[in-house]
Amino acid sequence: MLLALLLSTLLLHVTFAKNKIACVTGASGYLGMELTAQLLNMQYVVRGTVRDPNNQKKTAHLRALPFAKDNLTLLKADLLGGPEAFTDCVQGADVLFHTASPFATTNIKDPMKDLVEPALRGTEAAVGAALQSSTVQKIILTSSIAATMAGAMGKDGDCFHQHDWNTASSLNGNGLDAYRYSKTVAEKKFWELLQDKKTNPRRITGAAINPSFIIGPPRNARTDGESTTYMSLALSGILPYRGNTPMCDVRDVATAHIKAATVKGGTGGLDEKRPKTDVANHRFIVSSARWVQRASVLSWLREKYPTFDIVVGQKIEPPSHVIFCPSNFQTLDMKLRDPKSSILDMAKRMIELESVVPTVKEEKEL
């Protein structure tokens, strides 16, 4: 009996030892929740930061995730709260996934206050806390293609890749341009912190994931984000305000974060002189290679849901040229989902969650 008890205790200890600890900032967000779910499924112990852990409306779906009961802890953190706000999250953690950052392109009253300060200071705080910890070995930042380009279509034959930086956006432009500026300065701060021997004496490595417009099935019914608003408008018979744009699936973006933190092998990176032997200090563009036309999205939805009153977009044009060069995300052993399947999966899930009530055509139109 004693031997069996000892063996059971040893087995429990070994099992627990295998469970790595991940700190995920912005865990209740569209991407943060998908990332948290995938980490839990991989038997990670996850500490997720949210604005208010007691807000049941925004945390209920997180707490209901498989394995969340035993392996998920939600912590309060403010992007403007300095490194101290994230100390509990990174204490004893193996990896930090910093996804929290404002994503808004319309109704912005003060770009500096609404976008730049939380993006920049939040990065300084979360990354700073991880660098001060004694356990974090890798930091993965959620950046954006906005940090590589300022929205220029480019010319035939040209394409953007992971070594490009956005040098054109500023706070003087529209809301979208201000957002691009916020992501650019935040990512530059990230690399600055990692490359400074004073702020990073343990030489912790990192990677930046640069997704395009994220689509795909959400894990909760919220529609207050840019991505879910896009689909909500489309299913409600309203022309989405976002036009043609490159896209990627939220599930792929989350997987890219995890692979960047764990997978060996890779080419390219922030510093082209760095030995290309692993994914440390690399940027990974995750995106469709071409712009996805809004008219195509609306056409896919009309075809799938013929009884819904989905508006007709502009005429579908021939496919655009490749906007993003073949990216080093391929070295993460990933094949991205097709935008059409992601759009349809997203629509189906939002209808199931009743986060949107589609507008149905009148009987005479059917």
Image: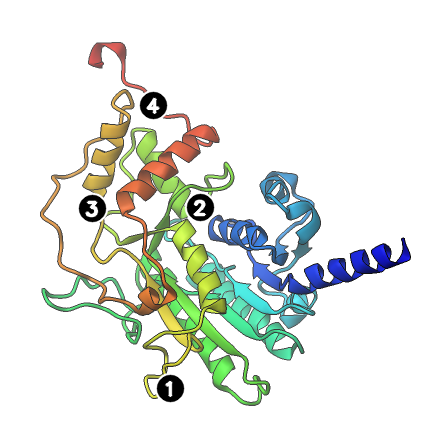
Of mark 3 and mark 4, the one earlier in the sequence is: 3
Of mark 2 and mark 4, the one earlier in the sequence is: 2
User: In x, y percent, where is residue 231?
Assistant: 35, 38
**Residue that protrudes farthest toward the right in the picture:** 2
- Residue 129's tag is none
* Callout 1 amino acid: Arg
Q: Nearer the viewer, mark 3 or mark 2?
A: 3
* Callout 4 amino acid: Thr
Residue beneath label 2, please? 225
Give the SS element for disc 1: loop
Q: Nearer the viewer, mark 3 or mark 4?
A: 3
Question: Which residue sits at x=21%, y=14%?
Answer: 365
How many residues crowd mark 4 within 10 Å: few (<14), some (14–19), many (20+)?
Answer: some
- Residue 274's tag is 1
Q: CA distance from mark 3 to mark 4?
A: 22 Å
Residue beneath label 3, please? 293
Residue 67 vs 303, above or below: the answer is below
Name the image quarter holding residue 281. Answer: bottom left
Give the SS element for disc 2: loop
- Residue 359's tag is 4
Taking depth in this image into account, of 274 and 264 the one nearest to the observer is: 264
Question: Which residue sits at x=22%, y=10%?
Answer: 364
| Residue 120 seen in the current view | no
Q: Nearer the viewer, mark 1 or mark 4?
A: 1
User: In x, y percent, where is residue 83?
Assistant: 63, 71
